[in-house]
Structures are given as C-alpha cells and as structure tokens.
Image (spheres, coloured by chain):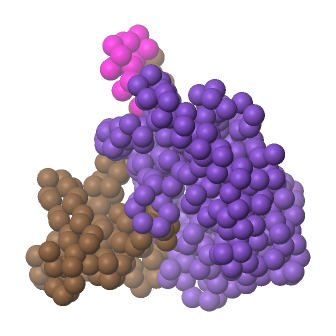
Chain colours: A purple, B brown
Amino acid sequence: MDAKVSGLMFEEMAKKPAVWLSGEGSNSQVVLSSRVRLARNIANTPFPSRADTDAKERIISFAKTAVEKSPELSRGTFLICSQLDDLDRSFLVERHLVSVEFTACHDLSALLIGEEENVSVMFNEEDHLRIQALASGLEIREAFRLADHVDDELSKFLQFAFDSSFGYLTSCPTNTGTGMRASVLIHLPGLALTREIEKVISQISKLGLVVRGFYGEGSDVWGNLFQVSNQTTLGRSEEDIVESLERVTRQIIEYEESARSRMFSEAKDQIEDKIWRAYGILKYARALTSEEVLNMLSALRLGIGMGVISTVSLSQINEVLALSQPAHLQKYFKKRMEPGERDRVRAELVRSKLE
Amino acid sequence: MLCQDCGKKEAVVNLTQVIDDEKVILNLCRECAEKRGFRNPLEGVPFPLAEFLASMLSQTQAQKPGKQPNPVCSACGMSFSDFTQSGRLGCGNCYLTFRSQMDDLLRKVHGSTQHRGKFPQATGDVMKPLREERKLQDELKKAIQDEDFEKAAQIRDKLKTLTKKI
C-alpha cells in the first residue's frame, strides 16, 4: 500500500471513533476502554535495539509472511512505517493503535491493523512484536482473548524467544514472563474532586498495580482520566493478571461511585453548576483547545452518569472525545491546520456534534 | 537543591525508591533526568523502571569495583555492564548468559523467577506435561491453604502419575 492510499484510509477511519470508544461493554460509564498488550520476540535474533539492518529486515519479512499465511490476519492492513507521515503517526497514537515510541519509527518498523481495528501488532518497536487488543468498557477478558488469539495465530508461523523458567524473553526485564500489560482507561472525577485519588493510588500500588494520570502539558491530569495496569509480568498467569486487574477496577468503580454520591449530597449546587457550565462552553464556544474539550467532557460525562444531563448520550461524548484530538481533527477535515485554526474548527465540530 | 548529577542546575525531579530495604534518592535537573531516561510524561514513557534499575545496578557495581564478573553474551556480544547502562537486553540468549544476575533482578522486579503463564503453541505439545505439573502444584498449594485435604490428596496422586511420565 503506498503512502497516499494509507493517508486516505486514515481519513476514512477518522470519520468515526475507534471501536474501543463505542461506549459499549460493561461499566462503560466509568471505564472507557480495556487494553492488553503482549511483547514477543523471534528466537535467535537480536532484539530491535541491538539488531542491525539485516536482522530488522529479516524480522519484517518473517512478520509479513506470517501475516500473509494466516487467513484471518491477512485481512488486516500491513503498513511499513516509511509509508506514514507525522500526521498519520499521531493519528494512530490517538487511536491507541500504536505507542508514542512508535511515532519515532523508521523504515524497518511495521504495523498490522486488524480488520476490525480492535487488534494491532507493532513490529520492531522495543520488541520484535507488540501485539495489542482493545475493547470498549471494562472488558479486560475480551481484550486478552483477542490478543491471545493473534499470538496463537502468529506463533503457528513464528518461533518466539522463550525459556521454560523465564517465560517469554523481552528486551526490557520489566516485561519478561507473560510479556503482558493489561490496562484500563478509567474516568474518576469523583475521586479527583474529593482529592481521594492519592489514597486510592497508594492503595493500588500495594497490590502490584500502577495508576497513572492521563497527563497533558504540565502536571495536571487531563479530563480526570487515569490508566490502571499491572506492574509485574513474571510469576503470574495471564488469567491471574486479568482477574486481579478486573477485581481492583471494580473496587475503584465502587470508590468512585461513593465519592460521587458524597459529593452530590454535600455540594449538589456547585457540582451541577460545573456540569451545566461545561455543557454551555462546549455548545457555544467559538474556539476550544484539546485540553479544554477533555476537561469539559469530563464534567459532561459526570453529568450523564449522575442523571443531571439527559440530552446528550455517552456515545456522543465519546465521538467528540475522539474527533476533537489534533490529528483526528486534521484527518476529519482532510487538511493540515495550525493550532489556532484547529481550535476554531474544533469548536465548530463540537457544536455540531452536540446539536 | 542542586542536581546531584551536574551540580549546576536546580533539581526538579525528586525520586525515592525502596528495593529490598535499600533506599535510593535521586534529585536531578530536567536535563540530567532525561539523560538517565526519566522523561516528561508527555513523551509517553511507559515507566522508567528499567532505566532506574539499570542505574541501581550500575551503582551497586560501582560500590564493589573489580569484584563483579562481566559476562558477555556469545550470541549478540552484549556484556552485563552494557545491560546495566541501557536497561535493555540484547537478545534471548542474554538471559541465559546473565542467568544468575537475571535471577536476582527479576526477583526484585517481579517477586518471582518462575514463569506461570502461557507457553508458545509450537512448543506447547512438548511442554504440556511440564505446564500441567506446574498447574497441579499451584492447585495443590491452594487446596492445602483451603484445608481441602481430600482434594489435595487427589491432586497429589495426579502429580505422581504425571511425574512418572515426565
């Protein structure tokens, strides 16, 4: 596929939010998405950071052959990184199909996007293969099932670096074993506003899980969005990791719900005012930055969750969330724009989507 | 406070980590933090643990000069000191070359050195009894914890038969 074709494909993709933002799946009011990634390397070949051009080319050609041989995977789209310009790469990051690290990729990196866009495989990133699956809502099990299946499919044609004691061998020892990182993207305005989030974070870190804010510039967490993921990958089975993340996420949801009801019983007027103001800004503003949209959408999402606002749906919010990101916006309107112009166009788009 | 690496600029990154009762405090300026691999969260760095471990390992090594062996991987040419600099291994064979060091490191990071998860499909058939054995051992442990001794006895019998096969 040449660069022009992939560019057009992304413009087509940008018309609607990614599958993982469909708003479906369990607890999708609070949990935006679940993700599982598996790190794999080809046996007897240096890891990407130490591989020369020949070795990297060999990996890409192995990968390509494996994908072509698999009836299922061959229906996806295989892209060599050099076919992607900077906007394409940012678009893929916003869509959670590649990591931020992958945007610095070179000719010797490649990407497979599954037919349904819920799985992707990065080749020659930190490891030879990074298999990834996404699902909307609290569906870690489903995300794991998808990633596991792609792994099985690829392992029919590729021999992975594996040791019966250490498990899957990865470039970084923090991924050794299952090579698995499972995570949820979770919206916690109740815990953030009542300042209980730090307590929850420190509790969770004792359980072998990591919580990170979704940071923009500076140290403020944007949109009250947090990512919870497993920290250890060795000594536990994949099912174990999925199960513990799911259990802890359910607990966080409970904390969040009780924080919300406390907040509403103590400061109903202020909270409602905050929600309606956010709605007003999104509906009538003439220029909006990404950060502003993310923060206003957080209030709106809370408003829907608490039954304050009923004229906007969760899927509308998710659509705005996806499309208002810088690269999405430019793909959607099929032109490159400077930040100032983007803010104007973004406000226009948000207005039209919230009609 | 000044950066402990360059001693010139104001330290803006303060990090404390306790591993095995050993406390390490780092006070760094932005540039030196970046040099050590602690970058702005905006750049999407997943977790600076690897870099941190690498710096810890090199610090421990520096404290005991000359005493540390420095094995070199025969497959990719990476030495153990290369690894402590970068925090990334060179290839699968490095794990075997640095086995004893990796045992220590992996135990520190994960609290375990034994894989309990999936086996690759291609080797699945050969490894199946081994995997089954591990699964039964886990089940046995749980049964004993739950004081379900009848179940424990059953599992033990299964294990015996399986061990004969292996």
Query: Where does residue A145 sit, x and y in percent of width and height?
Result: 67, 42
Depicted A158 relative to depicted B79: above or below? above
Which quadrant of the figure contains the C terminus of chain A?
A: top right
Depicted B157 relative to depicted A291: above or below? above
Looking at the picture, tell me which residue is in the foreground, A91 or B55: A91
Residue A273, located in which quarter of the rendered image? top right
Query: Where does residue A164 sit, x and y in percent of width and height?
Result: 47, 53
Name the residue located 44 percent from the left edge and 22 percent from the top edge: A265
Q: Tell me the chief SS of the magenta region.
A: helix
Disc tally is 0
Depicted A95 relative to depicted A210: above or below? below
Query: Where does residue A320 sit, x and y in percent of width and height?
Result: 72, 52
Looking at the picture, tell me which residue is in the foreground, B137 or B111: B111
Which quadrant of the figure contains the N terminus of chain A?
A: bottom right
Name the residue located 30 percent from the left edge and 72 percent from the top edge: B54
Name the residue located 38 percent from the left edge and 37 percent from the top edge: A194
Residue A197, located in which quarter of the rendered image? top left
Q: In this view, does A59 lie to the left or right of B79?
A: right
**Residue A269 at least partly seen:** yes
Q: In this view, does B56 lie to the left or right of B34?
A: left
Q: In this view, does A295 lie to the left or right of B69?
A: right
**Residue A42 at least partly seen:** no
Q: Does the magenta run of residues contain A54?
A: no
Name the residue located 69 percent from the left edge and 79 percent from the top edge: A338
Q: Which residues lie in the magenta part?
A: B138-153
Query: Where does residue B41 sit, x and y in percent of width and height?
Result: 44, 66
